[in-house]
Image: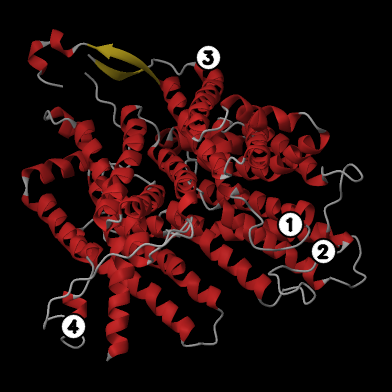
Amino acid sequence: MQLVLEKRAERSGTIALVSPLIAIGLTIVTMVILFAILGKNPLLALHAYFIAPLTDSYSLQEIAVKATPLVMIAIGLSLCYLANAWNIGAEGQFLIGAVAGSWIAVKTQGTDAGAWVLPAMLVLAAAAGALYALIPAICKVKFGASEILTSLMLVYVADLFLDYLVRGPWRDPHGFNFPTTAEFDPVATVPLLIEGGRLHLGSIIALLVVAAAAILLGRTIKGFEIRVVGAAPRAARFGGFNANQLIILTFAVSGALAGLAGIIEVAGPVGHLQPGISPGYGFTAIIVAFLGRLNPLGILIAGLFLALTFIGGEQAQIAMKIPLDVTKVFQGILLFYVLACDSLILYRFKLVFPNRQVASGTH
Amino acid sequence: MELIEAIILAVLAASTPLLIAATGELVTERSGVLNLGVEGMMIVGAACGFAGAWLTGSIFIGALFGIVAGMLMSLVFALMALGLAVNQVATGLALTILGIGLSGLIGAGFVGERITPAAHLYVPGLTDIPLIGRVLFGEDGFVYFSVALIVGVWWFLYRTRAGLILRACGDNHVSAHALGYPVLRIRTFAVMFGGACAGLAGAYLPLAYTPFFIPGMTAGRGWIALALVVFASWRPGRLVVGAYLFGAVTILQLHAQGWGVGIPSQFMSALPYLATVIVLVLLSRARTGGSTAPAALGTVFVPDR
């Protein structure tokens, strides 16, 4: 007896809808086992992860704050992945955006620069992120170099560059030698939505990005081209769609969104530039993109869910001394289950009994 | 003279994990499977390898722990990418994300602990020869093993029937299947071999390179190993050259930092990563007359019955 895959005649719409839910369910079952192995009460741990953050206003706002960069980056990545362009260096584009935007904040510090500072920071960050993403895209299109490897290598370069800036030329002279810039001026800070709260303007921008992506993919020719090039490259060639041009475009857009997310994070919740501004947003966003089925609305929901695991992970660490790495394990396992369940959309499992066909031999 | 010897020794030490991991990935890719999870398998190999050596006091058992850990990780990949026909790029990324988390979890209890690093060979007389003595006769076991490994892989791929079949699976899985070869089973073995190598390469870091474990200590070496396979045009001979070249870049930038060249250390540290990008571009550009990659690399195969 053997389990084999059989291609479905048509992709299953039902499973496409429920597969993320099955994946989350399977992940939670796995986590219960993991908590038990770690010697923690699984029910209390699940409560700390998934329920506790939803019970107070501060945590709810914090979830939206954490979801903001995840959703923005993941929307960009989903365009890439739909077009079969593998940008996995969003983390680097996020950091470069943060650096570029911070440049204006640092240079105008203490001057009487007006309200133009923040918009200029956002624009420059998006442009820098796009340019940084164009490096692997152009290397791919012009020279055929694997965009997966080049975009990832540039993450390490961006990380080191940021490190150099905050330890060297941009270090706060009054910062007791900590590797950080001075706190940004109020004109260089993303405004809060609720006085004294955590929620900031960036979350609104993220929602606008989701809406724009939904319109792009659902209502425009460009969006159609992106989907066709990824799903049916041969058909796209017959249709006269330029795959290389779409690689450049999707990389630039995703880089711009990652860069924008970077400066919003720095000029918003963090308030200054320092190493470690990202707990791996660029990589977690890959999971968000897949969990959201590369669909803008799905990504919004998936982003909120993964933000919940970040906040829940912190609470579980404080309340139950569960290591923070459990959150990463959780996210990795979740991505596995999401991908596995996606397989069910295209294939169905079938049991075969090879001993019926004597001639077919041993397998 | 002593400085030159020290540099050569350091280059060999820095190259060995790259060579071992890249050798494994080369076999995996020659069978037609692109496993991007090398970094994840390596870092889990590092954590488990250190745990094994610390618990038992034996470097050998530590290395075995690393190998088994890498193999188990690669089995998860095989189950997904081969068993369930999931996109290999996405699965490899998932493996790396999972591996980074798992290694943090496994290694958390061992941060700050030290072990006695792997012993170096000492042959009276030979090891004392100036300049080449320690380079040839004074390495740790991993270095010798890595050389044997790549020679063995070359011999397997080009001189055995099994190697020919493995390459056939990588170049045209439909034909290989039509000829009656169990493509998925062969690929599973190739993926497991890649996992074992990545795990061993990861274990090398805390067992021989530095005698302690720190989270994230692979620092992108798994990704560089992947780039090396491309650099080598999927050929074992060129892989050796590539691995030692990259080791040399890593060590030279470290020494340049030590000599106090007026360049900030972060720029020097970025060199190996930038070098990878530049090399990938130059090589891909030189290869305009058709790709040398295994033709079926990274494509899903579901046998029809």
Residue at 28 percent across and 77 percent down: it is B9
Badge 1: few (under 14), some or many (20 or more) residues near its Cα, within 10 Å? many
Measured in 3D between alpha carbons, the distance from the residue under mark 1 to the one under mark 2, in whole angstroms, is 9 Å
Measured in 3D between alpha carbons, the distance from the residue under mark 1 to the one under mark 4, in whole angstroms, is 52 Å
Q: Amino acid at mark 1?
A: Val
Q: Chain of mark 4?
A: B
Give how far across and how far down residue B213 sits, in percent. 43, 58
Name the residue that disc number 1 marks.
A266
Do labels 2 and 3 touch, CB within 8 Å?
Answer: no
Give how far across and how far down residue A74 sits, in percent. 61, 41
Name the residue that disc number 4 marks.
B132
Disc on res. A184: 2
Residue at 46 percent across and 88 percent down: it is B259
Measured in 3D between alpha carbons, the distance from the residue under mark 2 to the one under mark 4, in whole angstroms, is 57 Å
Q: Residue furthest bottom?
A: B1
Q: Chain of mark 1?
A: A
Do labels 2 and 4 touch, CB within 8 Å?
Answer: no
Do labels 3 and 1 touch, CB within 8 Å?
Answer: no
Q: Marks 1 and 4: which is nearer the front?
A: 4
